Image (cartoon, rainbow, N blue to C red):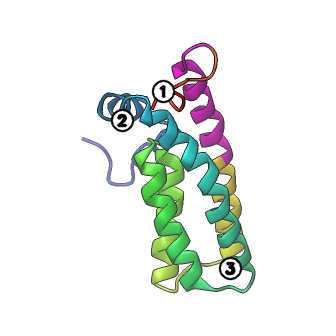
Amino acid sequence: EDAPSAQPPPPPVLEPEMLDELREIAGDEALSIVNLFLEDAPRLIRLMEQASAIPDLEVMREAAHALKSSSANVGALALSGAAKRIELGARAHALERPAVAVALLIAEYARARVALQGWLSASQAPVQSSSLLNR
């Protein structure tokens, strides 16, 4: 029996099984989904950074919600968890030190990006995938 004080283990930076599933469902589109996430996440994070300086909790909540969902879709579970903490804190108006929360999120995104780029390069056929050409 776990002691009540035992913390659940932190979520992994990347859950490869989720990416494998995405690959099975979406085929090569999975690579596009991950690439889109890597393009879009910095925009959401910048929004949160700007909003945390004000702080505008509503903007932070919306951006964190979007990031929570999109990062979970690509298996970036630690990042999704960090975004969820900001979303819930902002919704409850209980987000202490919003700028610190965003700084932690940025650190998680950096780790997720490295892991996802590793997955992409491992998943990509040698040379750039030509799926765009033969559509």
User: On the image, numbered disc 1 is attached to which residue?
Assistant: 134
Q: Amino acid at mark 3?
A: Ala
**Among the two numbered marks 2 and 3 on one chain, the one whose residue lies closer to the N terminus:** 2
What's the CA distance linking mark 2 and mark 1? 22 Å
Place of residue 74 in the rendered image (x, y in percent of width and height, measured from the top left): 45, 43
User: On the image, numbered disc 3 is attached to which residue?
Assistant: 51
* Residue at far top of view: 126
Using residue 129 as the reference point, say whether residue 5 is left or right of it. Answer: left
Label 2 element class = helix
Place of residue 23 in the rendered image (x, y in percent of width and height, measured from the top left): 38, 30
- The correct choice, above or below, for 32 with respect to 67 in the image is above
- The correct choice, above or below, for 59 with respect to 18 in the image is below
Q: Is the residue marked by circle 1 packed among few (<14), some (14-19), or many (20+) residues within 10 Å? A: few
Label 1 element class = loop
- The correct choice, above or below, for 135 with respect to 63 in the image is above
Q: Amino acid at mark 1?
A: Asn
Which segment is the magenta one?
A: 110-126
Q: Amino acid at mark 2?
A: Leu
Q: Is the residue marked by circle 3 packed among few (<14), some (14-19), or many (20+) residues within 10 Å? A: many
- The correct choice, above or below, for 88 with respect to 79 in the image is below
**Mark in front: 2 vs 1:** 1
Using residue 75 as the reference point, say whether residue 56 is left or right of it. Answer: right
Residue 117 lies within the magenta run? yes
Instruction: Name the image quarter holding the C terminus.
Output: top left
Place of residue 134 in the rendered image (x, y in percent of width and height, measured from the top left): 48, 26
**Mark in front: 2 vs 3:** 2
Residue at position x 43%, y 42% in the image: 9
